[in-house]
Image (cartoon, helix red, strand yellow):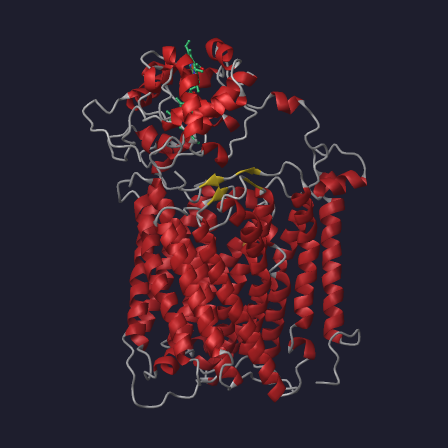
């Protein structure tokens, strides 16, 4: 790496230390809710914890990882020093200051709004300003990624953008556009109410704006993991990428389809028309396409690795795979969790089936499996893979890493499978208290204990993860030059559409206007649609 | 690469993508807006356009039927501004007006009868309740007669005055296992939320009255009135729905709890 080494390290360290803190909160929530502990008596503390856990895990961790990884990709893939280092540090500090501001407000009990901005619940303005700073910091990153790619193109006219950088930019543009929804919600609707300038708020409109951000933010979290699937995994396990083009197609499809489908979070919302709910549900089905393409491509790439290592026959290549390689384990675990989580997601997005699981523990189970499971396990791998470059620490301890990954996988399964199960039985999510002495609940008590134990494994795994990173010491040997996966055949010429973003960004914006335009105009122009705000922690 | 133009109909990738996306959008729109709406059993609208409007979420008759208006619990919209503390002038005027109330609500708002305390009551509560008496959403022959003589400004000043007085029991409920379960954690399976999540202790929601130190008889009467529906001015039926699920013994338990006074062995604390 050239100039961004300390920058990337700073992003990763803050992300993972915050992650470590938040995971303890998560386990504390699970424990408090379980039959193992007496109830704390103050549900507010529980919701405060949920807010802090969610804010860190959903906003701070993925944003910092995406930013840090993005800067690293920019230098490693484009093979030129990062342009705008000063600005990048400014963005970093904005994120830090914003996070601190939001965290203090949450800790004071002035923002227990559960990290989803659903009015009429309104938190202290400092919470929202903090989140705004985080987002503004990340916008700087978006701009820098775009500027760096442009500079590279100038130097390499007509050359094919490395796949990792292509995915990186897809994630950046996706984030830039999807964060607009929540930004509008916060700046136009919530902040005026939070500052006391207005007493009422158009809650339905606010929810629609939030849903604009809510789905695609998940894909912003997911991009680093997918970039790792395509551009790190095949190399790390000694294989070749099956298809470079497939990766580009997947990233382009994410750009187009992951954004204008968020109304699937509002299926139970009476203010949004059923027609739009159906259209969003249908298009949500489309985002499974890039995921299926990815699973296919990566499995094919893994098969190449198996065959290169002498695996023969229909399934013989599986045995030949480097199972002691942490990356091999991680990608396997990630796909298993992605499989279960994805299947659950298809149930969530079906307009009718959603009714049965809406707002139950099932939903919590679903997104933990996909995000905290499949995606975060790849965040671990990204850090492990980059660490020798960043710390100049030589190779990483494979045995410890395997233990850490196993703990994370088993812990996540034990945490989330019971959640799915009780969700189907009807256990609501975001409940601070369950009365296990009640005969109708008694039978479900063990599931909560099980999840608590799963959570404990996750805590151990997270501690181990940070320990592995922290114990790395600088050695004197120069780091092995970093490489991304090689495709098995590099196409002679990449179609210009798959080497640029203009078409996909245009489609993304156009589809957003079609899918969101009317619901927004309609709710914004409804008379008497505003309701009094409910300030949280106001008294 | 320069010979291949991006935004051009001759670019195969672009052409196919655009066609596919447009087709997908049109097909899903046709299904969602034209085919599906009339399939619902309860579909009573007539004509294609009505179906499309409904699928787009346009209310067919927004607020035009007055029937629903008659059923609303209150005409007061609680706004945070109603909760602000009064000015000295307002409090002073309120104190004078309150001389008409001392007979029942006690000197300094501390009732010695079964009438509720008003001392330290949140201003928006006093305003809302008086407005409800005035509009007939809450009925009490005594209070309805009294409130008819009050102007809007009088109501606000009275609220400011009573909010300014020290509360009957200044120590707020703190959470420990000795509190009755309904107050602490409610009963989720019966849809009873914890009292302290609205009435103070964990959170104090706008419009939820300060209950601590109220006469027990008053509390019991109000809860029973919520059950019977003779009191129905709670927005969204939030109290009625919870009270209906409560047994007589539970009503007695929570009323006894809230009616206890700071002097009963527990040291009072200065109001925050
Ligand atoms: Cu979603």
Figure check: A368 above or below B177: below
Q: Quadrant of residue A255?
A: bottom right
Q: Count the labels in the image.
A: 0
Figure check: A526 above or below A453: above
Point 26% across, 22% down: residue = B261
In x, y percent, where is residue A193?
Answer: 52, 44
| Nearer to us in this view, A452 or B101 | B101
Figure check: B165 above or below A303: above
| Nearer to us in this view, A106 or B245 | A106
In x, y percent, where is residue B82?
Answer: 48, 32
In x, y percent, where is residue A536?
Answer: 43, 42
Point 52% across, 28% down: residue = B236
Q: Is residue A460 left or right of residue A259?
A: left
Query: From where the camera sits, is residue A222 visible?
Result: no
| Nearer to us in this view, A214 or A283 | A214
| Nearer to us in this view, A58 or B147 | B147
Residue farthest to the right, as pictured: B47
Residue farthest to the left, as pictured: B265
Point 66% across, 53% down: residue = A516
Which of the image's four quarters has the N terminus of chain A?
A: bottom left
Figure check: A100 above or below A229: above
Point 51% across, 86% down: residue = A80
Q: Is residue A307 left or right of residue A507?
A: left
Query: From where the camera sits, is residue A193 visible?
Result: yes
Residue farthest to the bottom, as pictured: A477
Which of the image's four quarters has the C terminus of chain A?
A: top left
In x, y percent, where is residue A115?
Answer: 45, 51
């Amino acid at each position: 790496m050239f100039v961004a080494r300390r920058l990337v390290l700073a992003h990763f360290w803050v992300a993972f230390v915050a992650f470590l803190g938040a995971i303890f909160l998560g386990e504390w929530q699970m424990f408090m809710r379980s039959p193992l502990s007496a109830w704390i008596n103050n549900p507010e503390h529980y919701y405060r914890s949920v807010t802090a856990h969610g804010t860190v895990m959903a906003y701070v961790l993925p944003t910092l990882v995406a930013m840090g990884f993005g800067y690293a990709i920019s230098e490693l893939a484009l093979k030129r020093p990062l342009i705008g280092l000063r600005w990048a540090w400014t963005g970093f500090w904005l994120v830090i200051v914003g996070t601190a501001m939001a965290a203090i407000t949450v800790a004071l009990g002035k923002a227990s709004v559960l990290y989803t901005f659903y009015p009429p619940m309104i938190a202290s303005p400092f919470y929202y300003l903090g989140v705004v700073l985080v987002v503004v910091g990340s916008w700087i990153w978006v701009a820098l990624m775009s500027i760096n790619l442009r500079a590279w193109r100038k130097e390499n006219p007509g050359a094919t953008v490395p796949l990792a950088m292509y995915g990186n930019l897809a994630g950046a543009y996706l984030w830039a556009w999807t964060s607009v929804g929540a930004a509008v919600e916060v700046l136009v609707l919530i902040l005026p109410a939070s500052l006391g300038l207005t007493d009422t708020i158009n809650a339905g409109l606010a929810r629609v704006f939030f849903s604009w951000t809510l789905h695609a933010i998940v894909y912003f979290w997911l991009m680093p993991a997918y970039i790792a699937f395509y551009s790190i995994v095949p190399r790390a396990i000694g294989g070749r990428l099956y298809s470079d083009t497939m990766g580009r197609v997947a990233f382009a499809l994410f750009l187009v389809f992951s954004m204008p489908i968020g109304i699937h979070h509002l299926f139970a919302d009476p203010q949004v028309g059923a027609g739009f709910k159906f259209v969003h549900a249908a298009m949500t089905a489309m985002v499974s396409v890039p995921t299926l393409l990815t699973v296919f491509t990566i499995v094919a790439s893994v098969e190449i690795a198996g065959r290169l290592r002498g695996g023969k026959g229909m399934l013989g290549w599986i045995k030949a795979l480097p199972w002691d390689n942490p990356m091999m384990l991680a990608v396997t675990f990630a796909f298993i969790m992605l499989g279960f989580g994805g299947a659950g997601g298809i149930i969530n997005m079906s307009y009718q089936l959603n009714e049965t699981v809406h707002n139950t523990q099932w939903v919590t189970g679903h997104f933990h499996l996909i995000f905290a499971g499949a995606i975060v396990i790849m965040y671990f791998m990204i850090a492990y893979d980059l660490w020798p470059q960043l710390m100049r620490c030589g190779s990483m301890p494979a045995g410890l890493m395997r233990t850490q990954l196993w703990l994370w996988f088993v812990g996540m399964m034990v945490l989330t499978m019971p959640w799915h199960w009780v969700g189907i039985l009807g256990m609501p999510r975001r409940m601070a208290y369950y009365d296990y002495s009640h005969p109708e609940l008694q039978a479900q008590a063990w599931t909560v204990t099980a999840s608590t134990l799963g959570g404990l494994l996750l805590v151990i795994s997270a501690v181990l993860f940070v320990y592995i990173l922290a114990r790395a010491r600088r050695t004197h040997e120069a780091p092995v030059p970093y490489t991304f996966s090689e495709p098995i055949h590099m196409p002679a010429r990449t179609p210009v559409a798959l080497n640029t973003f203009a078409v996909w960004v245009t489609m993304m914006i156009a589809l957003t206007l079609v899918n969101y335009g009317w619901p927004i105009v309609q709710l914004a122009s409804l008379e008497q649609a505003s309701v009094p705000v409910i300030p949280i922690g106001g008294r | 690469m320069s010979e291949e133009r991006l935004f051009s109909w001759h670019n195969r990738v672009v052409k196919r993508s655009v066609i596919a996306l447009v087709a997908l959008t049109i097909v899903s729109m046709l299904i969602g807006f034209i085919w599906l709406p009339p399939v619902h059993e309860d579909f009573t609208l007539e004509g294609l356009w009505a179906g499309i409007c409904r699928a787009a979420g346009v209310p067919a008759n927004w607020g035009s039927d007055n029937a629903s208006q008659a059923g609303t619990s209150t005409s007061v919209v609680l706004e945070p501004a109603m909760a602000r503390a009064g000015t000295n002038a307002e409090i002073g005027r309120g104190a004078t007006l309150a001389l008409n109330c001392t007979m029942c609500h006690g000197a300094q708002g501390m009732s010695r009868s079964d009438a509720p305390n008003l001392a330290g009551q949140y201003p928006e509560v006093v305003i809302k309740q008086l407005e409800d008496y005035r509009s007939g959403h809450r009925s009490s022959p005594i209070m309805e007669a009294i409130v008819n003589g009050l102007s809007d400004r009088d109501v606000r000043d009275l609220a400011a005055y009573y909010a300014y007085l020290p509360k009957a029991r200044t120590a707020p409920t703190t959470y420990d296992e000795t509190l009755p379960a309904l107050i602490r954690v409610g009963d989720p399976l019966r849809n009873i939320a914890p009292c302290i999540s609205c009435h103070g202790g964990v959170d104090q929601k706008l419009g939820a009255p300060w209950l601590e130190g109220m006469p027990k008889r008053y509390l019991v009467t109000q809860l029973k009135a919520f059950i019977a529906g003779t009191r129905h001015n709670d927005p969204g039926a939030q109290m009625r729905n919870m009270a209906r699920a409560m047994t007589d013994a539970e009503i007695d338990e929570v009323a006894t709890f809230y009616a206890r006074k700071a002097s009963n062995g527990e040291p009072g604390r200065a109001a925050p």
